[in-house]
Image (cartoon, rainbow, N blue to C red):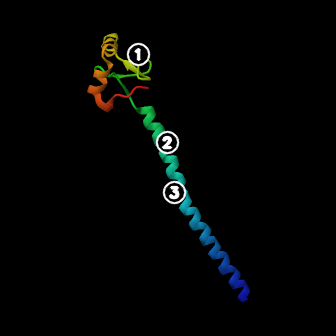
């Protein structure tokens, strides 16, 4: 009888230890997934901004320019031409709000 009680106590203790380990691992795994999903959502939702006038544009815009390895999108040919003439001025004025792709 003592052996049976001892076996049951050891089994309950072992299950308790396993349960604690699983409880500790699960939130970390969930957190990693949440961070990855959030990063993807932010990347997908981040609007492109015309660095000249600040208008929201899309990658489908017909007016683009390459500068310093990045592609910039514009709302009009006029904005694109102004940017091409002085890209550094528009990027400096906009600070870190303008992000090319």
Instruction: Single out the residue that lies furthest toward the left.
Output: 93
Q: Earlier in the sequence, mark 3 or mark 2?
A: 3
Circle nearer the N terminus (2, 1): 2
Q: Residue at x 42, y 32 (%)?
A: 45
Residue for badge 3: 27
* Residue 16 against residue 101 in the figure, above or below: below
For label 2, count other residues whose C-alpha is less than 10 Å away and answer few (under 14), some (14-19) or many (20+).
Answer: few
State which tag comes first along the sequence, 1 or 3.
3
Q: Position of residue 75 (x, y in %)?
A: 34, 16
Q: Residue 47: where, in percent of width, then height? A: 38, 28
Q: CA distance from mark 1 to mark 3?
A: 44 Å
Q: Nearer the viewer, residue 8 or 27?
A: 27
Quadrant containing the C terminus in the rendered view:
top left
- Figure quadrant of residue 16: bottom right
Location of mark 1 (residue): 64
Residue matched to label 2 = 37
Of the residues tagged 1 and 3, which is closer to the observer?
1
Q: Tell me which residue sits at (65%, 80%) in the image.
A: 9
């Amino acid at each position: 009888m003592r052996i049976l009680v001892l076996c049951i106590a050891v089994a309950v203790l072992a299950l308790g230890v396993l349960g604690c380990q699983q409880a500790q691992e699960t939130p970390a795994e969930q957190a990693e997934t949440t961070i990855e999903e959030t990063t993807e959502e932010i990347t997908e939702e981040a609007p492109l901004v015309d660095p000249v006038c600040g208008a929201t544009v899309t990658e489908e815009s017909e007016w683009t320019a390459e500068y310093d390895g990045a592609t910039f999108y514009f709302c009009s040919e006029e904005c694109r031409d102004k940017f091409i003439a002085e890209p550094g001025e528009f990027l400096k004025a906009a600070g870190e709000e303008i992000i090319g792709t």
